[in-house]
């Protein structure tokens, strides 16, 4: 073999290069397949370990029977179904939306055990509720030690129709920052019944509690469950907010809320050019509670509160929610307008006298009232007004410039 | 080492200036080549004869000093070729075989243990009933006669031996009486507005007057 000759060496070099290229390409294909396989394996491991800690929550209550329904004369049992997460062997965290107003609750585990649960505490501001299940011993999920950031991978685990498990892998797309009440916007797909579901990081730790999803466009019909399709945008309360609320519910059964001491109404500016369009301006103070933080800050009736903790205030409900989400004894910054002059000031919030702020407390039967003839008449009147406004806008001639 | 190479080393061998490898190579060659051995013996005898002639005296130690200086100034290269071009393809082939082997090991190591790991995941703790707790049943609420107070009555679906309860038929459909909760939220200017059932109507809208 004339190995030493240049032509022989060249041939060997070409052959060897080809073999080496083949090996490198083959290795890349194998490693890509290996990465996908590894991802599937990791997700499987996380969900298999966490799934027994995720439960279905049933909340039962008696509601009035619709006219014309047969059976029991006055009442029927209404059931709300959501998800929950075991944080201790016999406590389950879910959302207040699932259990509010319930007279009896049950928890169903992934392996089919179904037992009664007791309500330890509920908070409508943070939309969380803590249940105790004395007859169950559940494996627990741990809180993530650090707050999750944009881009982090999230696995959501919950249950939906027929208490069947749901699972979705996505990531954190955005942090909706509001004073003391942030939300994580996720790309995970969530389903009806996922309220209270777990949002886990890649270590299987809890990074949030699923609250809801982006509303579909258009009016939400009463048949929403039947028509709704997953929007692919979901929201979760982050662990740094969940944890103190959970601790508080566990220890004292309620969450202390901040109190400013003002009675406000909405103030908005009607547009002269765009009929029906109004721009919210803020929360106009009608009364100030004597000796309250608002009075100490110098706020007086007639003032328009426009900012709280450097965030623009548009509606009284928004400001009330932010104030309630702030811990008592926190020092907060407010901006208000009197006449044409803007003033900023700081004050220390006190604790709200009621366990649940009066404005946020649901009155018994209020939801039923949503379906009452009076409410329906109100909505019909609103539709009539909007229809007239729409036809007026469509018929309006274009003004010559 | 061939004869030609060995003869080139005779002078240095006589002067004891060979490296260890050269010396061993040359002596191995002598053992198998009587011709070179004889030629070297002849050279040695000649040199000894020349050495027996009367010498001109020079300054004492001059020769050692000059030799030592020369040795220090010029490093002696190894005169035995250690590798030739014929080893290049052999070495490359061996390296390729090693890479191929490593790739195959990587391949099998990536797939086989992973798929094995999927089957052999660590045991997961399952929810259990606390010992002594009552057997769970499907709940049924009824209004007590003449009131709206709820009363729990015995359920239809009794638990099986493992405590598992079949789902109520009513939960298999989505009638008005069963609601699967997932709050709808709207986004506006980077903020999520919950259209939650938790905010009462009196607190919503522009006409709301609220104290907080």
Image: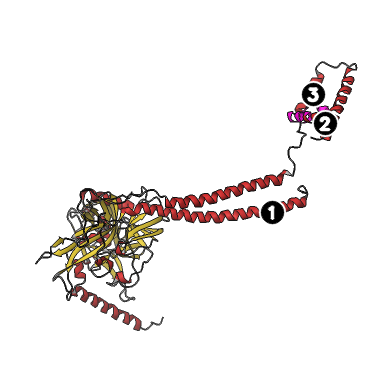
Residue A176: tell me if it is visible: no
| Residue B14 among those drawn in magenta | yes
For the point 79% across and 21% down, the residue is B65
Q: Which residue is mark 2?
A: B33
Q: Is residue A69 above or below residue A181?
A: below
Q: Secondary structure at mark 2?
A: loop
Residues A109 and A197: in front is A109
Disc number placed over residue A15 in the picture, else none: 1
Which tag is nearer the camera, tag 1 or tag 3?
Answer: 1
Neighbours of disc 3 within 10 Å: few (<14), some (14-19), many (20+): few
Residue A207 rendering spot, x and y as whole percentages? 35, 53
Q: Residue furthest left?
A: B146
Neighbours of disc 2 within 10 Å: few (<14), some (14-19), many (20+): few
The reply to the same-chain question for discs 3 and 2 is yes
Disc number placed over residue B67 in the picture, else none: 3
Residues A100 and B44: in front is B44
Q: Is residue A366 above or below residue B92?
A: below
Magenta-highlighted residues: B8-27
First-in-chain label (3 vs 2): 2
Q: Is residue B74 above or below residue A105?
A: above
| Residue A210 among those drawn in magenta | no
Distance of label 3 from label 2 (alpha carbons): 31 Å
């Amino acid at each position: 073999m004339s190995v030493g000759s240049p032509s022989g060496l060249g041939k060997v070099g070409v052959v060897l290069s080809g073999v080496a290229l083949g090996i490198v390409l083959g290795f890349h294909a194998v490693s890509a397949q290996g990465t996908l396989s590894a991802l599937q394996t990791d997700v499987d491991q996380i969900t298999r370990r966490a799934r027994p800690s995720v439960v279905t929550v049933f909340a039962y209550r008696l509601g009035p029977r619709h006219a014309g329904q047969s059976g029991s004369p006055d009442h029927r049992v209404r059931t709300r179904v959501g998800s929950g997460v075991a944080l201790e062997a016999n406590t389950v965290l879910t959302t207040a939306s699932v259990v509010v107003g319930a007279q009896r609750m049950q928890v169903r585990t992934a392996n089919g055990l179904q037992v009664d649960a007791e309500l330890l505490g509920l908070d409508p501001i943070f939309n969380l509720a803590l249940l105790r299940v004395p007859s169950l011993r559940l494996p627990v999920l741990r809180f993530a030690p650090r707050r999750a950031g944009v881009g982090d991978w999230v696995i959501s685990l919950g249950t939906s129709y027929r208490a069947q498990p749901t699972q979705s892998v996505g990531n954190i797309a955005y942090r909706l920052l509001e004073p003391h009440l942030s939300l994580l916007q996720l790309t995970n797909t969530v389903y009806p019944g996922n309220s209270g579901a777990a949002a886990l990081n890649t270590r299987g730790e809890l990074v949030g509690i699923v609250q809801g999803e982006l509303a579909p466009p258009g009016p939400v019909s009463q048949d929403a469950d039947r028509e709704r399709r997953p929007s692919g945008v979901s929201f979760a309360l982050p662990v740094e907010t969940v944890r103190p609320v959970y601790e508080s519910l566990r220890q004292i059964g309620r969450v202390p809320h901040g109190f400013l001491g003002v009675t406000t109404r909405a103030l908005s500016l009607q547009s002269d050019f765009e009929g029906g369009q109004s721009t919210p301006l803020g929360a106009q103070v009608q009364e100030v509670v004597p000796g309250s933080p608002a009075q100490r800050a110098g706020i007086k009736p007639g003032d328009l509160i426009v900012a709280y903790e450097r965030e623009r205030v548009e509606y009284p409900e928004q400001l009330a929610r932010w104030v309630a989400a702030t811990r008592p004894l926190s020092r907060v910054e407010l901006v208000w307008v009197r006449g044409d002059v803007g003033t900023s000031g700081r004050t220390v919030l006190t604790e709200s006298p009621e366990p649940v702020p009066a404005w946020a407390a649901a009155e018994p039967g209020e939801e039923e009232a949503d379906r009452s003839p009076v409410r329906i008449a109100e909505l019909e009147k609103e539709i009539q007004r909007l229809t007239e406004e729409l036809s007026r806008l469509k018929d309006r001639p274009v003004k010559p410039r | 080492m061939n004869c030609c190479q060995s003869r080139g080393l005779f002078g240095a061998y006589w002067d004891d200036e060979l490296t260890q490898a050269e010396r061993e190579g040359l002596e191995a060659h002598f053992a198998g080549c009587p011709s070179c051995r004889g030629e070297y013996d002849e050279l040695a005898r000649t040199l000894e004869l020349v050495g027996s002639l009367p010498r001109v005296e020079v300054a004492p130690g001059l020769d050692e000093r000059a030799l030592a200086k020369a040795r220090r100034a010029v490093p002696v290269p190894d005169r035995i070729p250690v590798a030739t071009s014929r080893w290049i393809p052999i070495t490359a082939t061996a390296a390729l075989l090693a890479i191929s082997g490593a790739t195959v090991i990587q391949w099998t190591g990536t797939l086989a243990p992973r798929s094995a790991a999927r089957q052999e995941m660590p045991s997961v703790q399952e929810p259990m009933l606390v010992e002594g707790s009552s057997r769970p049943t499907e709940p049924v609420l009824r209004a007590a006669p003449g009131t709206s107070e709820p009363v729990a009555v015995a359920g239809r679906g009794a638990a099986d031996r493992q405590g598992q309860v079949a789902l109520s038929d009513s939960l298999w459909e989505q009638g008005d009486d069963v609601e699967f909760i997932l709050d709808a939220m709207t986004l506006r200017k980077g903020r999520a507005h919950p259209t939650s059932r938790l905010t009462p109507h009196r607190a919503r809208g522009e006409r709301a007057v609220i104290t907080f």
